[in-house]
Amino acid sequence: MADKSRTWRQWWNKIGPGIITGASDDDPSGILTYLQVGVVMGVRGLWLALLTLPLMSAVQEMCARLGLITGQGLLSLIKRRYNPWLVKVVAVVAVAVIVFNIGADLLAIGVVVERLVGWPRELWIILTSAVIIIFTLKFSYRQLANFLKWLTLSLFFYVAVALSIHLNWSELFLHTIRPQLNFNITEIMLIAAVFGTTISPYLFFWQASEEVEEREESIIKRSLKRFTVTKQGLKNLRQDTILGMSLSNLIMWFIIASAATLASRYNLNSLETFDQAALVLEPLLGQQAYLAFATGIVGTGLLAIPVLAGSVGYILSETFGWQEGMAKPFHQARGFHLAIALAVLLGLFLAVLKFDPIKMLIYTAFAYAMITPPLIWFILRLSSDRVLTKGHVNGWLVKVLGYLALFVSLAIVLFYLYL
């Protein structure tokens, strides 16, 4: 028994940025987007989970490898290769969309808790914001990482739901491997939103910077004078990234499958309220379905918002040359920590402006889709630079998948704009 416990702890401690990155991808914005896909497109939307998995894995692996090899975040690397004005444009646009995402997630938390408790959503939005700011400022990187790892377990709620209802597995498998869609503006927007919330720009910045944090922590812990990138280290990085992205898309698949199955049962054509979204959990939990749905939204929101705000901290710090890092206390990285707090406060401001929560969450996903292609292009260029990567450039498969992610995401956005 002791051996099993030791093995579990060793495995748990090995979980790296890839798992947290993948799990945080299924934030309230992602969950509502996947639910909407299941309701509107039905099982025809399942192929999206399969298609995006290798694409997001390749992009995230490139980001992680850049951070591990260079010891610098993604925007710092863009800054080294391109004009400062371009870096600032990228930073402004990325920060704006990420802050909007924070606001959408905070609003989702406020709405579901208000429905449960009855107190105004503004109160819960403020309390959630305060907790996140205090937590990210007070605790170390390792403490934050361990906390976020535990929150990833909340995602398996949706797997349990899918397994509790009668699903036509052969039909689901067929639609997973066979793309089928209607070329109308609603479905194209949903597909773009899926790409935006799955291959999300904030994850690019976050994972690259977290690999830098892991690298620095390793140097201090092992008293290294020089950090050496080994084949085993790159293999572990790749495995961690693929595992994290697989977790993310597995949850996506189960959410779409459950929503598609139950949409026909309840005659839903679209999601307009969180009560309708909670119907996905009703077969498993009955009258407690909304409580479970709210718990999932709060859990995934608490997982994603620190990642989102941390991404803003990294982006602004790398743009202006500030000291950065979750591992650094406030007095050593004031600009970084203040940027995180400001991002949450701006999100709070957006969350109390009475936007429609469902639309705000889905529009956030679509906004990501608009800025994803140029960022993937930067990542492809940087990770193919032999000098920058010290010879550890993209393999042919990663390169093919990376360019495919670029062209598919760009084509979807252009097609939507054309319609």
Image (cartoon, grey):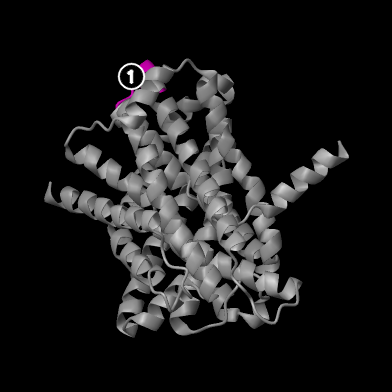
- Closer-to-camera residue (92/244): 244
Does residue 73 sit above or below 126 in this rendering? below
**Element under disc 1:** loop
Horizontal side of residue 171 vs 341, given as left or right: left
- Indicate yes or no whether the magenta region holds residue 266: yes
Residue identifier under label 1: 267
Q: Dividing the picture into quarters, in which one does residue 89 lie?
A: bottom left
Image location (x, y in percent) of residue 106:
49, 52
- Closer-to-camera residue (178/139): 178
Image location (x, y in percent) of residue 6:
81, 45
Does residue 310 sit above or below 291 in this rendering? below
Does residue 12 sit above or below 82 in this rendering? above
- Residue 123 can be seen, yes or no: no
Image location (x, y in percent) of residue 198:
40, 48
Looking at the rendering, the stretch of residues picked out in magenta corresponds to 262-270
Horizontal side of residue 125 vs 410, given as left or right: right
Residue at figure coordinates x 24%, y 31% from the top left = 180
Q: Which amino acid, by three-letter code, is at mark 1?
A: Asn
